Amino acid sequence: MRTVETRPPTSVTNSAPSKTEAAARKRLAGFHDVHAEGKAYLADNMYIRSGYRVDYSLTHCFLSLFELHNETWNVWTHIIGSLIFAGLMYSAFNMEIPTHLWTYDDGTHPFFEPNNILYMENGRHTMHLFARIVLSPTKVHHALEYVLDTRYQEMLSKQLHVASVIFGHTIAQIPSLQRFHEILDSHAEGISHTVSEQLFHLHDELTVLKDRLGPSFDALTKSMPLKSVVGSYTQVHGMKQSLQSRLDALSTYLRQLDTNDYPALQFVLQEFHSVTDSVKNGLHAISDVTPSKLAPMLVVGNWPIKVFIGSAVICLTLSSIYHLMWVQSAAASVVFIQLDYSGIILMIAGSFFPLIYYSFYCTPTLLYMYLGIISSLAIGCLVASLCTKNQKVRSGMFLSLGFFALVPIGHLVWKHGVWDDHIQIFVKPLLAMGCLYLVGAAIYGTRFPERYFPGHFDVWGHSHQLWHICVVAAALIHYNSAMQHYEWRWQTGCAV
């Protein structure tokens, strides 16, 4: 960046200056010089003694983006912030699961990996692995938005209970088949050993599966979060597949036994077939516990986060434009400050959307009521900022919009209690964000640090720049909080 030299004030003529004359007249002036020329609107901070742009045209204002003056870093702090949020917006629109998350290198789509702790990544359940292992690729779109469809909970829990009872009956029946082994040996050598070995493994696997059905049943009946249901289902599915393979092998072996030479053997084999049929019935009872019924709907969207990001981009961009362009004239300063106010209003309103949407997601009436009130207040503030010159009216509208946050938050505290997840998921980031805004406002209001070192922070590090940094930092904290809130909601659905 280049520094434009400060020149002494020149006389003002009534004739319209040429481009050459305008370029010659534009300069950086001191605080007292600006006031002496009757352009006090350019300088309202007596502790910033220099760097005021005087006689800058539209083109000169734009080019001053690359000059050093007392607005340079007011502009750039919000340009950088706007670019950061533009990148976050791109990320928000590209949240699909990449295909490598649910396919192997050979192009196959595995359903079960016995050697892995399924749906775990760094010790935590993840929806990415749920999409990779369980969901059919044809169903993977915004897999992060899948939640448990509670319409199937009662049906699935009943089926798990029936399967558990059938398996319990079969487990008790298997030991009684030992008495038939002698008959098998008397008809064909080696049959008894093979069948006994198969039944031993069948008994063990059946016992493990029955024990696993208990937690799965609890996860459904107690409306546990989706990750708990998915974790239980994963283990049941793997055991079910293994048991099905064991059962198919035993059934095939029994059917292949030649009973023509031993007619009486077929009556004994019928007893073994009754056991395999019983196990098949139990497996059939849980066959409807499918991923498509655990997670069939795309219901938790990230559009409120996009609304917030969009409002942040607009606010920071309009603020940058204001600080860059407003010095052209007193009339221009009024127009650009109104644009700046409009951006602030949009960002305040946009900040409400993720908090209200994910907090009241399971109560649509309250959700849309609060969003409607926020939108109405924002429109009222926009009209007030653009149409009224009454500072008290504008201030009142701004305060009503900002402090309305206490209403939905108070509602949540009243309904769930302070220590409930509905509150804890956002309260710490909200407090951190509030602290940043308060610190920034205190710095801006007290004109720190330039108040104590007049003229030393004219270009770098004065209060307005620090306020801008606090605003961007608070907005980033709010974005991170919104993402956590979003993830919490699709993890829990409406079960909590």
Image (cartoon, helix red, strand yellow):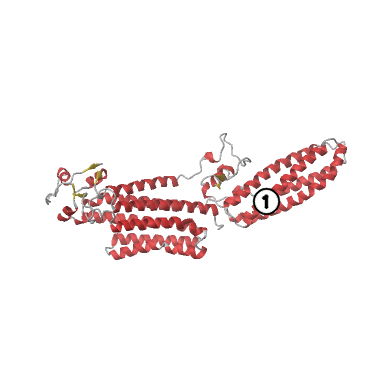
Is residue 360 in sight in this rendering?
no
Amino acid residing under circle 1: Leu
Q: Position of residue 199 (x, y in %)?
A: 77, 43
Q: Position of residue 207 (x, y in %)?
A: 72, 48
Element at badge 1?
Answer: helix
Q: How many discs mark residues in the rendered view?
A: 1
Identity of the residue drawn at 40% across and 55% down: 433
* The furthest residue to the top: 106
- Judge by depth and name the residue closer to the eye, 5 or 393: 5
Identity of the residue drawn at 32% across and 58% down: 442
Q: Position of residue 117 (x, y in %)?
A: 60, 43
Q: Is residue 147 left or right of residue 190?
A: left
The residue indicated by pointer 1 is: 213
Q: Is residue 201 left or right of residue 468?
A: right
Q: Is residue 392 above or below residue 357?
A: below
- Judge by depth and name the residue closer to the eye, 250 or 18: 250
Is residue 281 in sight in this rendering?
yes
Identity of the residue drawn at 24% across and 50% down: 456
Instruction: Classify residue 238 by image quadrant.
Output: top right
Instruction: Classify residue 390 by image quadrant.
Output: bottom left
Identity of the residue drawn at 54% across and 41% down: 101
Quadrant where the C terminus sits is bottom right
Q: Neighbour class for label 1 at 10 Å: few (<14), some, many (≥20)?
A: many
Q: Is residue 469 left or right of residue 108?
A: left
